[in-house]
Image (cartoon, rainbow, N blue to C red):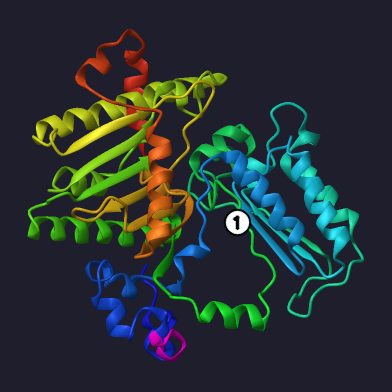
Amino acid sequence: TNVSDENLLSLGKHEQLLGKSSGFSSTEGIMNGEPFQKFRSLFRLAPCFLLNGEQIQPLKEPGEFYNQLKVHILSAKERIFLAALYIGSNEKDLVETIRTAVKRSKQLKVHLLLDCLRSTRADHDASESPANLLAMLVKEFPDQPVTEFEEHDKPYELVLPQFPDPVTESHLFRKCAASAMKEFIGKWTNNHEFQVIQRQKNSEERKNEQNNSLDTIIFPVVQMGPFAIRQDESATLYVLDAITKYGNQRDNDGEQVFFASGYFNFTQKFKDKILNAATKLSVLAASPEANGFFRSKGMSKHLPQAYTLIEKQFYYDILKHGKSHLVTIEEYKRPNWTFHAKGLWYYMSAQQWPSLTIIGSSNYGYRSTERDLEAQAILITTNEVLRKAIHEELQHLRENTVTITSETFQQVDRKVPFLVRIATKFIKTML
């Protein structure tokens, strides 16, 4: 579902804000300049906002992100909004950080938006589920004042969305299915990382930022297949179309795209775009050992084999289309690490750093497009500092990757059992 024109950020109305000091002389200057020109239709697909690229700092490691998250929580004065699949039941340090922040500021409001099924499931003791851990925070501060913009009478709001599905809505399924199986049908994955919204900047900070060069545009997009909201899919397919068209016009000299998917299972639409593209494209995927379900308990322990089968089929599709000189697969393998990265990086012709990247939660597979709620940000920039940082982020991932060949699937540990091959055909849209 595309965002209506009425809801778009009208760049024309903000020309005065941009001004000549912004680096763009006018709205037409923004839309006609490279690299923005080739993606100008994104303005019709999604809202956008502009900023200076040096206001963005990519984080390379999970530890960096976790520490930065706590820093921002502790510095918040009015409002914190956390959106995630779930908060681990062992994340007592994070919960304690939130508690400390609330004690520091009597005006602080905290909103927690998590997946219902995953957050109410506990591996052993039901009392240790993520929801129960967080519910204690809700009860701990019942009398704290609220801000004037809030409607609720408590400093905490814990929301656990559950998405409709013909299967999960049935009484028999709700009564009999295990919690993990219910999650298998569909869940909230926005984001697999937390999002923190801090207090609004004061007027002096905003004034100073307006004097900076606005050289970066961000388009936020969402996807929720069960509600026929397909904005992210439409925008990403458009980006691939725009890159391919541009590559053909320039004879594809130096153009390159990198795709990353923690659970590699491209939909047919994405596969068609990739296999028919004239641009060099590398897919970063998890090796079986880096899959989040590697050596898990129960039936899920076979999921790495299912993803191996899907990857193998895609690899031979590349060979069938005669695209092995353009399309490659790189597997991430790092001892004691799982691969959960996802995104897209686009390098223009003869450019050593990317000009566009997609950041968010989608794996570009059937599950992301048809079952889960996903949120992404398409970032286009001319800022050299940011482009270099985004490049380094990608190279940091690629340091632990190996390019796949036909010999890879001949290895003993890549043999997929017959029953797994059969089951994968039936559950492919859930992966």
Q: Quadrant of the image for the C terminus?
A: top left
Q: Quadrant of the image for the N terminus?
A: bottom left
Q: Position of residue 365 (x, y in %)?
A: 36, 43
Q: Is residue 231 left or right of residue 114?
A: left
Which residue is at a point 20% across and 61% down the rendered structure image?
Answer: 242
Where does the magenta region start and end? Answer: 15-20
Residue 201, visible in the rendered structure: yes
Task: Note whether 130 is above or below 332 in the view shown.
Answer: below
Q: How many other residues sit within 10 Å of disc 1, few (<14), some (14-19) or many (≥20)?
A: some
Which residue is at a point 22% across and 29% down the rendered structure image?
Answer: 315
Q: Amino acid type of disc 1?
A: Gln
Task: Note whether 286 is above or below 24 in the view shown.
Answer: above
Closest to the observer, 259 or 50 = 50
Residue 263, visible in the rendered structure: no
Q: Position of residue 48 (x, y in %)?
A: 42, 73
Chief secondary structure of the magenta portion: helix
